[in-house]
Amino acid sequence: MVTDNILNIPIQSLKTLHKSLNYIRTAKLWLQVLIAMFLGIACGWLLSPSMGLVSSSTADIMGEWLALPGRLFLALIQMIVVPLIFTSILQGIAAAGDIKKLKKTGLSATFFFMSTTVLAVILGISVGIFFKPGQYIDTEKIVQSDTAKAKIAAIQEQSANQSSAEDVSPLKQLPAKFTGILPKNPIHSIAQGDMLQIVIFAIIFGLGMLLLKPESARPILDLTGSIQEVSMQIVGIAMSFAPLAVFGLLAQSVITTGPESLLGIGIYALAVIGALALLYIFYIFLAFALGRVSPIVFLKAIREPTLIGFSTNSSAATMPITVKSAEEGLKIPTSLSQFVIPLGATINMGGTACYQGLTTLFMAQIYGLDLSISALTALIVTAVGASIGTPAVPGVGIIVLSGVLSSAGIPLAGLPLILGADRILERFRTSLNVTGDLAACVVLNRFIKSPNDKTDG
Ligand code: ASP
């Protein structure tokens, strides 16, 4: 056997290895990301303290270093996401051309988002009622250790900061909430990274722009067009190390949460993943039945954004890839994709809503609480509102969930049970949130067409 290297590996094997590596290097991004995900999970598993290969402090340090490219990746995307969302919405509005068409698109998108989100909560609740995941949990498991108590206190505090004035009736709070979403100082909203306010500012600004004479609007359009292009270039640079980022982020996630965090509450985790799988099928069905896009084409187009959503835990960070896939894979006109996707990334969270409905039921079952029809109706309304308000960034969904639980009158003491698994389950719901935005594009594209529509693809 011919060997010509210090490890004594046969030349033929080296050639095959080189060929495979080359294949992976030049493969499509989704495939690279998928491979990176598996390798990341495997690496995290090997290094996780339960495997006993390295001590838990060494595993922690290694996890931090492995996650470094991913953190840089996320920071780069987060840095660019505000100008990108703002300019994309302006360009989307400008491409729509006139206010009448925009009104139709805006109203149809809102209708689609709301109705599918309501259905998503109902789906979550139904899976909860049907499978009763809470009945398998031993209430003794709700350990009241000091760390568990400290975690609940921290979540409660953050949740209270988000929705203060509990004692004021919700009906009285509503008008203030409406005025609250209008950014009084857009620069402040940008500095705070408040996506909902930024989106609203961009829409109002874009509408104002449509009322101008074309020659007066041109400079703004040219400038925002250039900013958008620069932002996309930066996204392109970030994407070139997406597989490495995904590998490290997942490895660290498995090291810190450990695969056992899912196993401990297996039935609940399975119920969440099952409910989200049904929601996935529902979106594919909508794209097919209403959007007339075959499941194969739809699945092919959405694989990249859903994998990136899964890996980054953030629909906002995934937004640029979602827009690209909509335009290139699904041939959605820019006027639609650049308006609907940034809006959807901010307010359309079917996956989150489904999860909130199911988890509330799960917690109620743990405490033996029976939710009446009116409590379930209130839950649907709260979960729809809460999913709209959930920021499209990692790790905040659980805080919003605690608000939903409190308003349903469910004690928060059970939260530590799902804390570990939440970071993993959040990945699934983020993928679903992204899928929902793409399904919306496909459906709206069939019903709202304009002669000057153009795609990038
Ligand atoms: N992280 C999710 C997203 O960005 C939201 C959630 O936590 O449910 O879509």
Image: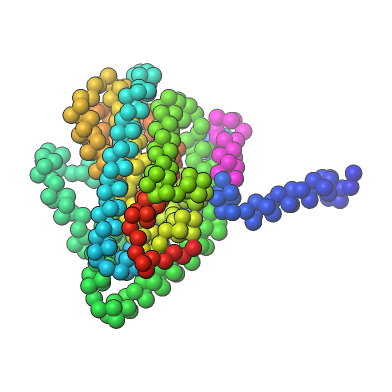
Q: Is residue 228 left or right of residue 343?
A: right
What percent of the width, then of the height, locates residue 65? 54, 48
Find out whether residue 48 is within the magenta segment. yes
Q: Going 48% across and 44% down the picture, which residue do you hit?
A: 295
Note whether 220 is above or below 303 in the view shown. Answer: below
The reply to whether residue 404 is visible in this rendering is yes
Residue drawn at (26%, 33%), measured in percent from left and top? 405
Q: 454 or 165, which is in the foreground?
A: 454
Magenta segment boundaries in residue numbering = 35-53
View extreme (right): residue: 1
What percent of the width, then of the height, locates residue 159? 26, 41
Residue 359, quarter of picture: top left
**Residue 441 as seen in the image, left or right of residue 20:** left
Magenta portion: prevailing SS class: helix
Q: Nearer the viewer, residue 337 or 445?
A: 445
In this view, 97 is above or below 386: below
Q: Is residue 325 above or below residue 208?
A: above
Residue 13, x across and y down, in percent: 79, 46
Q: Quadrant of residue 251?
A: top right
Asked if the magenta segment contains residue 117, the reply would be no
- Residue nearest the observer in this picture, 241 or 106: 106
Q: Residue at x 13, y 45 (%)?
A: 173
Front residue of 373/296: it is 296
In this rendering, position of residue 404 left or right of residue 305: left
Taking the spot 15% from the left edge, 39% from the top edge, the residue there is: 166
Q: Is residue 187 visible?
A: no
Q: Position of residue 456 (x, y in %)?
A: 46, 65
Give the total number of marks visible in the rendering: 0
